[in-house]
Image (spheres, helix red, strand yellow):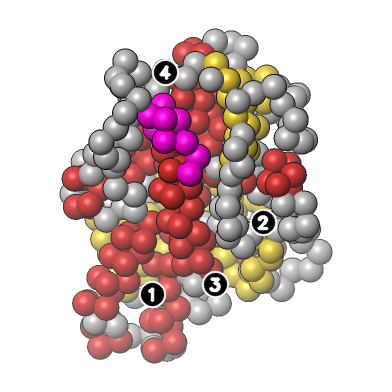
Amino acid sequence: MRVVIAGAGIAGLTAALSLHAAGITDVTVHEAVEEIHPLGVGINILPHAVRELIELGLGDRLATVGVATADLTFLAPHGHRIWSEPRGLNAGYRWPQYSIHRGRLQTMLLEAVRERLGPGAVVLNSPITDLDHDADLLVGADGIRSSVRHALFPDEGEPLPGGDVLLRGTTYSKPFEGGRSMIMVGDDTQKIVIYPIAPPADDGIQLINWAIQRTTDIEGVPVGDWNRPIDVEKVLPHVEGWHCDELDITALIANANQVFEYPLVDRDPLPRWSTDTVTLMGDAAHPMYPTGSNGGTQAVIDARVLAYALANGLGLEFYEEQRRTVTNNVVLANRGDGPEVILKLAHERAPQGFTDIETVMPLAEREEIALHYKKLAGFEPATLNARRSWSVDPQASTEVSSAPSP
């Protein structure tokens, strides 16, 4: 079987590795850019995707370049604690959660593809613009502006603006909360997420990622322009007076080494992803808001399920059955703020702050919000820990009696 993949991002590279591990070795990844650089800012890979990368033999590399997230805390703007929960191994998962620089993750995957599939497996400066390719299967993993998706749905139009803007950056700073924590601070109009994306250097300094999402009052942000640099002075007024224990949020942002402005966009869920010889994955299939840290995670799982389906003779219908409903639900949940809705609810119920969160939002309600999203996105701990693997033994028969739960 010959497979051509459009796009050498997280989805496309993980697909190449997964297909190779499953015994499908005639795989070529075509990438439009002339050279792949470690660009971007932070990303979280949740335990259900870390599991897949570890099963691909990438666990040691992940541990070297990423930060194993220990906990997540939601705070009101003046520092009042709304909700805290352990993450990764601390939450009872069999696999960690990693916070990592997106470009470093992509570089790690690229190196693994070239090692395992050969140096010619990734062809640069080679955009795929139509569906006419000499392959048994064309996989569109070419992002939110996917040419493959456009060829399948030529009348779809531009990505859909959500009405908010993201202001994102990274800062070299002293670690906070032990160097493995993620915090979210916000109200009903804006929020900021902060987390480290690299282990501390020898001098103790750590690369910290931060992102502010707010209702836009900035005109002229092109939809789909994901690399627009802006002056940090435009960002500082949005966090004036915000506090978080030992972390000085204003100073963190003021010392940023890079700041980008992103429009918050996604696309409506599709009724199908595939034809007999073409399918989609990752942002080409289900671009979503970054709420809940699920974009890259769902792309990794797409890749693994596709390889499982093809290696076991189950086809694209099985792949869609396992993935399309799950990811469509995440896309729609993220439009409603996903688990981060507790920031909005806390502000609506106590706009002047509170001394006891229990009087504002009982523990049972906070627990249910967090658990509901985990179930919807496929990473409720007990279910994930118990389900079978998506790994394929390339020497095994193509007949399977059952498949892992979604």
Q: Is residue 112 visible?
A: no
- Rendered location of residue 92, percent (x, y): 18, 49
The front one of 317 and 259 is: 317
Disc 2 crowd rating (10 Å Cα; few below 14, some 14-19, many 20+) is many
| Front disc: 3 or 1 | 1
Element type at marker 1? helix
The tag earlier along the polypeptide, 1 or 4, is 4
Task: Compute the Cα span from label 3 to label 1.
Answer: 12 Å
Mark 4 residue type: Gly
Q: Are marks 3 and 1 in contact (CB under 8 Å)?
A: no
Q: Residue at x 35, y 18 (%)?
A: 394
Question: Which residue lies under the disc numbered 3?
Answer: 190
Element type at marker 3? strand
The tag earlier along the polypeptide, 2 or 4, is 4
| Front disc: 1 or 4 | 4
Q: Quadrant of residue 83?
A: bottom left
Q: Residue 23's mark? A: 4
| Front disc: 2 or 4 | 4
Element type at marker 2? strand
The tag earlier along the polypeptide, 2 or 3, is 3
Mark 1 residue type: Ile
Question: Which residue lies under the disc numbered 2?
Answer: 262
The tag earlier along the polypeptide, 3 or 1, is 3
Q: Quadrant of residue 274?
A: top right
